[in-house]
Image (spheres, helix red, strand yellow):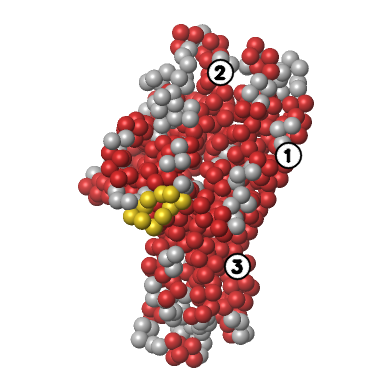
Amino acid sequence: MPSAPCSTDTLDCERETDRPNMGRETIMKEIHSPTRRRTYGSTLGIIAFLLPGVGLYTLFMLYPTIQSFIYSVVEWEVLNPTTRFAGFGNYTRLLNDEVIRIALANNARAWFLYAGVALPLAILLAFALSRKARGASVFRFLYYIPNVCAASVLALIWRFLLAQEYGVNALLRRLGLGSLIVPWLSTDGIVQWTTNLPQTWSRVGFWTVIFLAAISGISEELYEAAQLDGASAWHELRYITLPGIRGIYVSANVLAMTWALSTYIYQYILTQGGPLYLSETLMTHTLNTLFENQDWGYGSALAVFQFLLSAVVSLLVWRFLRRGEQTVGGMV
Amino acid sequence: MGNQVQAVRAPATRSDSWYGIRRSVSRVALYALLGGWAAMTAYPFLWLVLNSLKHTWEVFQNPFSLPKEWVFRNYADAWRLARVGTMSQRSLYVSVVSTVLAIALASTTSFVLSRFSFRGKKLLSGYLMLGFMVPATIRLLPLALFSRKLGVYDNLFGVALIYAAGRLPFNSFLLTAFMETIPHELEEAAVMDGAGMWRVFWNVLFPLSQPALVTLATFQALYSWSEFILAFILIESLSKRTLAVGIVSLMGEFFTNYVVLFAASVLAIIPAIIFFLLLQKYVVKGMSAGALKGA
């Protein structure tokens, strides 16, 4: 088990940076004064305070992550990992896995719906709420509700709404749009989108609250000045709000990418990745390989692949959008 | 100076009536947008509540009308037959234990990170931030295997512990940022009185961090109440399933009697919504405090 890096650290007391050359003993003996703070604490104390948190975090987060890397390259004996190196066969198998291609396309759809639909909609809603709309707090509360509900329960509701005749299809019939009725969860070309739509729906409110907080940090005087100049709502949005929330927009995009790559629960509950793998995502494929097929070596390789892909892609999105910030004035 | 401001704040130069019309048009568009999305958000919930109070046959006949006969018995059935009662007790237990543990782990860690400087501190923060990048899948199989050896497999306390440890990056990030804003004067007074690390932590920093701790606890409790995949993999016995997992397994059992399933779903989400209603200002505060990650 890897030990936490903190355990070997020596400590010095607070404000060490002000007096880098002083030894610990000297600092401990200092007398309290307004400029030199009386200090407290010891190496042992600091280790004792860090040990529960960092220790359990290492045990339940980092250790299993490293284990998965190992599991993906060792031989397995009847559901038990051995210490014998088996080579990178599981990784070359990734290259020939048809389902990964289908799955990545579905993750890309999830990303498209987050970045192309949910984020712009959330910005619009947050802008509207920030323009002193009556009942803004009620709207905000309502929009956020899907984010406090268990996603598995929401998925269950959506399964009934989409799969059965008395959900969305009944609504369409009632509205006189009977010609639009389709089996939403079993039609190729449609199921890939419908399995991603509920999570898009549920996250709009999350981002609305985020953007609303960002907008409330913009000086109200800018808006007042614009209104006196007769600026339209569109101009306010374009020239004040959007530039003002750029930083949060970048973070939201990174988060959208991360979430899109770990999309699974609606697919898992609505269709189990079916029909015929059509709605698999990277994560449902990993879960099915691990726990349905009990192919633990390959499943671990898939999990590692998802982890690395997610890390690399979020880094790239971050870098790309940050660079854009320096060269492009506007946000979109 | 005052005169200058007056001059700048002169009325708009555009024709006033045209300006007024344009603003009221955009006002209408604004409410159409807000109301439209409100309807989209509320629709699945209204559908669920409405149909959870009907007989099964009526769901099929009129999915949108009010129930002809209000079947409150569905809720009694969900509570007993579908075992929502016992499942929510378990979820409550997991939420409370994981929240208490999360507060203990994050407050001790953040105390050190916000109050002391030592070699390798940056490395330690980076090490904790790594946790933001670890997806749930990569931990699942190793956790399922070695939690047996640790004796925390198929164990609700174990799940709560794993929730608390797994959310440490997010929680300590939130709490360290808050503790750094607490001035040093009060703890100095305590140190003058001869307080050691523990007393400074417990009598000064911990109580002063209360607002951030409430935010942390709100997020942790909501997360623990709703978490699916870890609870699904790490809890094997049917008799230990939490609500978020148990409801899904009811799908097969109540497939012909889904009104009970609807009632069970309502019962599963109502506590979270009420909890959020009471503590929403802390959620919003946490999110605006840069809690964007991991929520």
**Which residue is at a point 69% across and 27% down the rendered structure image?**
B260
Q: Is residue A74 above or below residue B115?
A: above
For disc 2, the marked residue is: A164
Rounded to the nearest angstrom, the CA distance separating label 3 from label 2 is 52 Å
Amino acid type at circle 3 is Phe
Residue B80 percent across, percent down from the top left: 76, 34
The residue furthest left is: A327
Subunit bearing disc 1: B
Q: Secondary structure at mark 3?
A: helix
Q: CA distance from mark 3 to mark 1?
A: 35 Å
Would you name the residue on which mark 1 appears?
B85
SS at mark 1 in the image: helix
Amino acid on which disc 2 is placed = Gln
Residue picked out by circle 3: B206
The front one of B101 and A128 is B101
Which residue type carries mark 1? Gly
| Residue B86 horizontal/vertical position (percent) | 72, 42
Crowd around label 2: few <14 · some 14–19 · many ≥20 (10 Å): some
Q: Residue at x 50, y 75 (%)?
A: A47
Whether callout 2 and callout 1 share a subunit is answered: no
Q: Left or right? Give the position of A114 relative to B165.
A: left
Q: Same chain for marks 3 and 1?
A: yes
Tell us which disc is closer to us: 3 or 2: 2
Q: Chain of mark 3?
A: B
Q: Is residue A303 left or right of residue A136?
A: left
Q: Residues within 10 Å of mark 1 (few under 14, many from 20)?
A: some
Residue A35 lies, in percent from the top left, at 45, 83
